[in-house]
Amino acid sequence: MTRILIVDDSPTIRRMVRASLTATEATLVEAASGLEAIEQLTLGAAALMVLDLNMPDLHGLDVLKFVRSHPSLGRLPVLVLTTRGDESSRDAAMAAGATDYMTKPFVPLELAARVRRLIEETGAAPAAEGRHAG
């Protein structure tokens, strides 16, 4: 089954993203910090990650750079979902390897549609199934 990792330090946002993605029939896994996201990625392959930029321990861009530099995670689709709507934040995220970029507040149906599109475009099957990233 497809596994989606939701990374945001806000429990409310994680619940909203989870509710938006229930129709995807994916296994939804949550992480409340950048470090927890990396831990979750080492515990099991994900088909997609929804990633906030602003987090207290490890900035989302650092998580993204880690993902892109790791051989077994490098092709993981990453949808950045953040309050940062400025062009420089978007450009920085895309330059670091984000696959898509959305701002909060978000429209649940749009988030679900983008996630489905990214999974379809990238083949959704986790390439690193059973392998560890750490």
Image: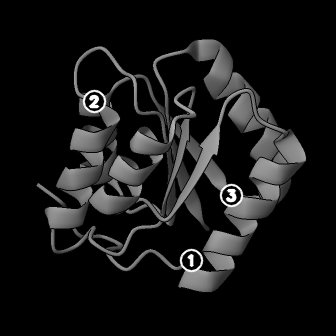
- Picture residue at 83% right of the left edge, 51% below the top: 110
Mark 3 or 1, which is nearer the eye? 1
Mark 2 or 3, which is nearer the eye? 2
- Picture residue at 46% right of the left edge, 18% below the top: 9
Q: Amino acid at mark 1?
A: Ala
Q: Is residue 58 left or right of residue 8?
A: left
Where does the image place residue 23, in percent across and percent down from the top left? 86, 53
Q: Marks 1 and 2, how far apart in space?
A: 25 Å
Q: Is residue 21 left or right of residue 121?
A: right
What SS does tag 1 mark? loop
Q: Which residue is mark 2?
A: 59
Q: Marks 3 and 1, how far apart in space?
A: 10 Å
What SS does tag 3 mark? loop
- Picture residue at 56% right of the left edge, 77% below the top: 124
Q: Which residue is mark 3?
A: 26
User: Quadrant location of residue 82?
Assistant: top right
What SS does tag 2 mark? loop
Q: Residues within 10 Å of mark 1 (few under 14, many from 20)?
A: many
Q: Which mark is residue 124?
A: 1
